[in-house]
Image (tube, helix red, strand yellow):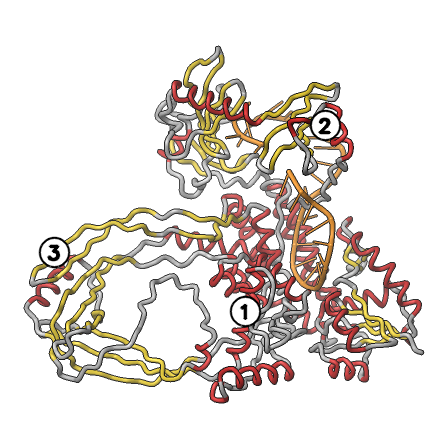
Amino acid sequence: MQENLVIVESPAKAKTIEKFLGKGYTVTSSFGHIRDLAKKDFGIDIKNNYTPNYEVSSDKKKVVTELKKLAKKADIVWIASDEDREGEAIAWHLFEVLKLDPEKTKRIVFHEITKDAILKAIETPRDIDQNLVNAQQARRVLDRLVGFELSPVLWKKVKPSLSAGRVQSVAVRLLVEREREIMKFNPVASYRVIGNFDIPSSKSTELKAELNNRFKTFTEAESFLSDCKESDYKVSDISRKPAKRTPAPPFTTSTLQQEASRKFGFSVSQTMTIAQRLYEAGKITYMRTDSVNLSDTAVGAAANEIKSEFGEEYLKIRKYKTKAKGAQEAHEAIRPTYMNKPTISGNASEKRLYELIWKRTIASLMSDAQLEKTTINIEVSKSEHKFVAQGEMIKFDGFLKVYIESTDDEEEKESEGILPKLTSGEALNYNNITATQRFTHHPARFTEASLVRKLEELGIGRPSTYAPTISTIQNRNYVIKEDRPGKERDYKQVILANNKIDTFDKQEIAGSEKSKLFPTDIGIVVNDYLLEQFPKILDFNFTAEVEKEFDDIAFGNLNWPEMIDRFYNPFHKSIDAALEISGRKSGERHLGEDPKTGKPLIVKIGRYGPMAQIGDVEDEEKPQYSALRRDQHLETITLEEALELFKLPRDLGLFEDKKVVAAIGRFGPYVRHDSKFYSLKKDIDDPYTVELERAIELINEKREADKNKIINVFTDEEGEIQVLNGRYGPYITLNKQNYRIPKSTDAKALTVEDCKEIIKKTPAKTTRKKGKK
DNA sequence: CAGTGAGCGAGCTTCCGCTTGACTT
């Protein structure tokens, strides 16, 4: 019997396909790419027509040996990697590395994992498309050149270990520019007027309506309310208009990330981890895709489910087409494998994500919702302005029965309910009319998911890299994801009720943020520098432009080293030019003079991050330094705020003949005594005012707590072995290394020998390979 | 893992896109 070897990219896919093909076919996977450019010397021979130097990655050595073994045994090797650029390159690398025989190698592709599709693919094999492979090589080489030439410039000019690249640097730019827009933004106030009306003809109901005008000033609002006091009200006009709503298309990677973030607050990497588990369990299709397409079999299964669950009238077959820039359509949309399973077993997040995917997929094939929008105008006899009430009634729910897409708008949504029955000309009485001062909102900060959406819109990055990119810019400390409290803001409210107008001064919290991305000072300085020196790379259209050329290469109309050469020559010149300019980029700002010494006060990025400095390094007297606090930024800190920093550390006095000092560190305010740290209590202590007496109290408290922490101490020739109580239960510590105590051991009873035994048995800490997380 | 910020300098950092495990304090 003929032995066949089929190679796909993912092991989960291999498992499924093996079932379809049966005897004579071994299906295995390459686990993605098996080779990459070497790390040293760029992995590219630039002088020699950009010849790439590929190496089997260290974590792929095992896979490659295994594949070689299997290929040797096979009569025919079927390479079934994805049909896109990267997939074609994987096919070519496999062919090269496994040294396959052209006569015995066939390249096949399929778009859905069904028996029919796979059998059909096997009947229509083709050759490896070298043009498509070349387009990938161009992509790979360009990214390496950009990344490995730009990053070292940053090491010299800003700070070591920083990074830059075609994708990540644009992501940071988007955040920095949005942040600047927000800083510049001045909220504009206006008065929004809401009227609540009684309906004499039906005593129970009330009608809420908003004025079709907002007043710029308090005086205008107040004078309008005085007019209202003297006015009569009547329904002047009622209009009803039919409307419809259509469902959103099935999920792609980026839309799944957005909805999971909006509906459940998942980070993009959380969503991907959960989706990966669902995929491996065979519950959903592949989760890294930019396609909204559903296979015919899936549409059929979904149609059956809709008909039996909701009825024929709820079914509407639609064909979705992908619009995203640079989409490569190697897969289907993300959908349940079995459309007749609305729920699954699994943990809570797996269930939630699965149900979301099921609902979205089903809804995408359901009927439009039919609505009726009603608008009622109310005339005010003493004013030209009108009140407008809007209502919405669902006449046929259609897809709304299962799924409603969320939006990023945080604006409070006025629920547009059903309006009471009224007739034109009917008189109304006001119950109360309220003018509230409202403020315009600055542009929204990005969440992880909304940044992914923006990148996708620009055609930058791929489904497999969205989550890693978001992590990289956070790991480099260009960006931080955090909550920030809002500020208290005063606003005015004028209320007309019971024939009386009253004014209230009120407060609200405005501008609080939850789980948003903020650029850091480093991110801002790096972005400004890159934008100044390498505007082309940071251009939002750069990726789209090179993608066009990659397409030309893929069609065989452009030679890839030529394309790279045209890009590289001017690019490399700009690198040299940037390195010629002496000095570092520190984002230095001169804030003014220190009133005490008359010396200049500056803020800048120092070796350890953002800092303030009084005096010059060249002065006789050494400058004073202070790190900025976490909530302070180079661009916005004022002279007063910076001077405040130098009031710390404060000398509190002596305790047990040693100095006690109060200051603020990375983990917040603390007092230091005898080179030990004692945290100040949040909301109770203030480092600017705390007294010695209180500091001693804190020191004693901590000493007491530490007593309970120590179970036992032994002194050994290797150092001090301590048995301690920790967060995760008792543990042993020696020379700053911690060791776990086996369960069911009484920590108190451990002897020195027991401890040494445990230490010896603990495997040496696997020194994490480079690329710290 | 909290304080620092001078200067020297070995050796290292870094990209984007395919994939899945090992990591547990």
Please check whether the numbered discs 1 and 3 fall on a single chain. Answer: yes
Chain of the residue where label 3 is placed in the rendered structure: A
Residue lying at the far bottom in this picture: please name it.
Answer: A312
Which label was assigned to residue A580? Answer: none
Q: From what the image shows, is residue A299 above or below residue A57?
A: below
Gap in angstroms between the C-alphas marked 2 and 1 = 50 Å
Q: Which residue is mark 1?
A: A355
| Chain of the residue under the numbered disc 1 shown in the image | A
State which chain disc 2 sits on. A
Quick one: label 1, few (<14), some, or many (20+) residues within 10 Å? some
Up the image or down, A484 lies above or below A293; here it is above
Across and down, in percent, residue A421 comes to 21, 81
Front position among marks 1 and 3: 1
Q: Decide: marks 2, 1 in contact (CB < 8 A)? A: no
Q: Which residue is mark 3?
A: A502
Residue A133 in view in this figure: no
**Which amino acid, mark 2?**
Cys
Q: Which structural element holds mark 1?
A: helix
Disc 3 crowd, CA 10 A, few/some/many (<14, 14-19, 20+): few
Instruction: Identify the residue at horizontal 21%, vertical 59% (top origin).
Output: A436
Q: Which residue is rendered at x = 81% and y = 72% of the image?
A: A79
Quarter of the view holding residue A280: bottom right
Front residue of this view, candidates A746 and A213: A746
Mark 2 = which residue?
A: A755
Element marked by disc 2? helix
